[in-house]
Amino acid sequence: MASDRLPPYRDATQPVEVRVRDLLSRMTLEEKAAQMAQIERRVASPDTLTGLPVGSVLSAGGSGPAERASARQWADMVDRMQRWALASRLGIPILYGIDAVHGHNNIYGATIFPHNVGLGATRDSDLARRIGEATALEVRATGIHWTFAPCVAVCRDVRWGRCYECFSEDTEIVRTMTSIVSGLQGPPPQDHFPGHPYLAGRSVLLRMRKNVIACAKHFVGDGGTHKGINEGNTICTYNELEEIHMKPYLDCLAQGVSTIMASYTSWNGSPLHSNYHLITDVLKGKLGFKGFVVSDWEGIDRLCHPQGSNYRYCVLASINAGIDMIMVPFNYQKFLEDLIFLVESGRISTSRIDDAVERILRVKFVSGLFEHPFSDSSLLDVIGCEEHRLLAREAVRKSVVLLKNGKDKKKPLLPLDKKARRILVAGSHADDIGNQCGGWSITWHGDSGRITIGTTILEAIREATANETEVIYEQSPSEATFSNQDYSYAVVVIGEEPYAEFLGDRTTLDIPFGGADVVSLVASRVPTVLVLISGRPLYLEPSLLEKIDALVAAWLPGTEAGGIADVLFGDHDFEGVLPVTWFKSVDQLPMNVGHPAYDPLFPLGYGLKMNLEKTK
Ligand code: GLC
């Protein structure tokens, strides 16, 4: 159809703001309210998507079309829902959202990159951008449009279960790594107004082919939650909130981040989900954010105690504070009923509704969703492709931090000898993809075991060593391991079990599962390098530290453990430096650079090299 017969909102040659205003003018209050709802895939149906079209559908962590579903099955599911939405009266496409927070981590066989704490150890913004590009392609291959990433929290207390989702405790390091937004969304178009990429020209409209919509989270101050208590209270001055926690959002805005997620936490007792000053005055007013603010999962329900008790108040307080889309995710009818009642009774203004829907539509037009609502089957082969796995291996290599190398003036143990006669590999995390991926991997909380396709540390060591080298693997070594057997050296890999959010909150940070005992047993008999798999620093007993010959912090490396072998055996030198302070005792926490009593075991920024040229 010639563009002169298309309604403006369907005409891609029209400026974005013209399309927004035209579509908004055609919508009923019910349709506007529906656009402000995000529902979980399990309640998506022709009724919810065609009858009264929601603005968005999401997959909760691990919520997919089937166990180990293929990319094709995911794409078919999303496309089916999209067809329901496009059959609605105005044919507004849905945004499908998911937590692709370290690669497309929900999908069996996808490339899983190191979690953010490991990327923070690289300080490499170009690497972050390239990971964003690769992640966007794998997400689009499944037909999904939107990822709830990056988390730009500045983690100030490593007892918090979400420390590993943070790039660092240091604001400037987090700011450096926000370049992932440009990788996910594509660089801001040149013809955009400074700081307002949404008022952009045509170039943005093809975005949806290879890019996805990003979501900076969780606004604001989540990383400062008191004592690391998840969904807790961040107690600080406004200046500290700005200086420590808000600055990374400026970098995300400058890159045109399309969405921002509100934080479960409170600031000095005021819940972010109902904080008009921070969301409307500051984020939308002072900082000029033109995209839309989405709540967290049942985030508005938490505004009432008991949770969700007075839901109508929760809707009132959150929408009037400036939240534009509510991640309901199930109680869709109640949300709609309350929102419409509150508008018709004048307690929520139509101008507030129009502002919210304008922002949602703006993101849908700017991203190219109207022109590219469906999956692109030509992308299916990118899921877990060799190029992405090599990128992940590079990220792993650059993220691991060497904390000790050498003992009693002996020659440093690393780099390890690839041609040693016999070596021991031991520990609960040496041959476990699930443990090395951590939370947000295939399921919400992650799981131990062979959860997806990838290379374990043991497999990487076997690949790196010479054929004549005998590699003995003992998950739980004992005295018998050493009777009439000698080893040139041992690699012991232990650490944390996978967890997510509140499941990871700890008051003590000892190495779990008796890992320390395994290290002690092995290190007292064989030159040993300890490789720690964890989302954060763990307590290291001084005597344990004394016993081992080398110590490597590998964080949560994801599927490509080859990157760990690359440095252990000296194919590359270590580059990683600590993104968080390594404490001596949890009694010191919270302890960050700049604190008067700063007395770490290893300070922020610490990391050794092997200086390979000297060892040749
Ligand atoms: C979770 C997390 C948030 C995530 C959302 C959707 O509770 O707080 O980071 O994006 O729900 O899974």
Image (cartoon, helix red, strand yellow):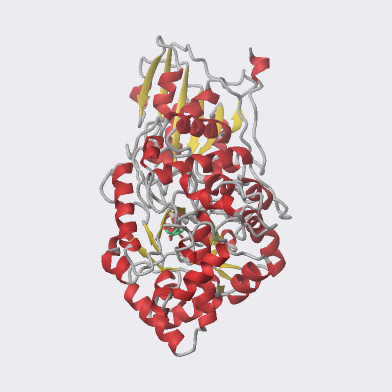
Answer whether residue 324 is visible to the viewer in this image. Answer: no
Q: Quadrant of the C terminus?
A: top right
- Towards the viewer: 544 or 361: 361
Q: Which percent across, then down, holds residue 82?
A: 34, 57
Q: Residue at x 61, y 35 (%)?
A: 576
Give left or right: position of 33 versus 590.
left
The residue lying at 62 percent from left, 18 percent from top is: 411
Q: Residue at x 34, y 51 (%)?
A: 62
**Is residue 194 toward the left or the right of residue 332 in the image?**
right
Residue 171: image location, x then y, percent: 66, 53
| Ligand 1 rendered quadrant | bottom left
> Which of the image's four quarters has the N terminus?
bottom left
Q: Quadrant of residue 281?
A: bottom right
| Identity of the residue furthest to the top in this view | 468
Q: Is residue 435 above or below residue 160?
A: above
Q: Residue 295's x, y, as percent?
A: 48, 67
Of the pair 58 and 46, the residue shown nearer to us: 46
On screen, residue 91 versus residue 271, left or right, reads: left
| Total labels drawn | 0
Q: Is residue 532 above or below residue 205?
A: above
Q: Is residue 85 visible?
A: yes
Q: Is residue 146 left or right of residue 242?
A: left
What residue appears at the point 62 percent right and 60 percent down from the top-left corner? 199
* In this view, 365 is above or below 484: below
248 versus 428 height, above or below: below
